């Protein structure tokens, strides 16, 4: 079983965020990680999702999942987590 973290405000170059990222990612293989993005509001163009995907790619994380609870929600996606 994996771990679940709820984390927002990922901004590169912020010392507090970098410190938290190090704590969360310590000892984990970025190639095996999955990040699920749940927007706080509708994000039809995935504007904010793309920013977060770019943020995590800096750490070598490539698998990002998008869970839009407003218009694209599919409960079957959870079985892939």
Image (cartoon, rainbow, N blue to C red):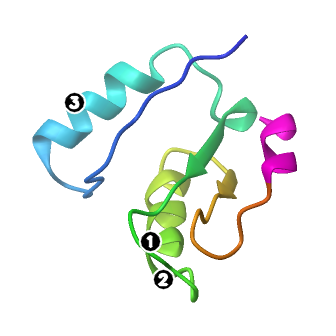
The disc, 1 or 3, on the residue closer to the chain's N-terminal end is 3
- The image quarter containing residue 15 is top left
- In the picture shown, does residue 65 fall above or below 26? below
The reply to whether dot 1 and dot 3 touch (C-beta < 8 Å) is no
Residue 27's label in the rendered image is none
Tell me, for residue 19, which label it has, or none. Answer: 3
- The extreme left residue here reads 15
Determine the CA span between mark 2 and mark 1.
7 Å
Decide if residue 31 is on the left or right side of residue 59: right
Taking 10 as reference, is 21 above or below it? above
Label 2: few (<14), some (14–19) or many (≥20) C-alpha neighbours in 10 Å: few
Q: Percent x, y for residue 54? A: 50, 66
Q: At 79% across and 58% down in the image, what residue appears?
A: 74
Report which residue position mark 1 lands on.
51
Mark 2 and mark 1 in contact? Answer it, CB < 8 Å: yes
Q: Quadrant of residue 7?
A: top left
Which structural element holds mark 3? helix
Q: Which residues are magenta?
A: 75-81
- Looking at the image, which is closer to me, 68 or 32? 68
- Does residue 14 appear left or right of residue 75 in this picture? left
Q: Nearer the viewer, mark 2 or mark 1?
A: 2
Callout 1: few (<14), some (14-19), or many (20+) C-alpha neighbours within 10 Å? few
According to the image, label 2 marks what residue? 47
CA–CA distance in space, label 1 to label 3: 19 Å
């Amino acid at each position: 079983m994996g771990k679940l973290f709820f984390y927002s405000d990922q901004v590169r170059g912020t010392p507090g965020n970098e410190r938290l990222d190090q704590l969360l990612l310590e000892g984990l293989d970025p190639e095996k990680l999955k990040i699920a993005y749940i927007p706080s509001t509708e994000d039809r163009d995935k504007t904010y999702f793309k920013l977060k995907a770019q943020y995590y790619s800096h750490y070598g994380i490539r698998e990002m999942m998008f869970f839009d609870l407003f218009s694209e929600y599919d409960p079957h996606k959870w079985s892939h987590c």
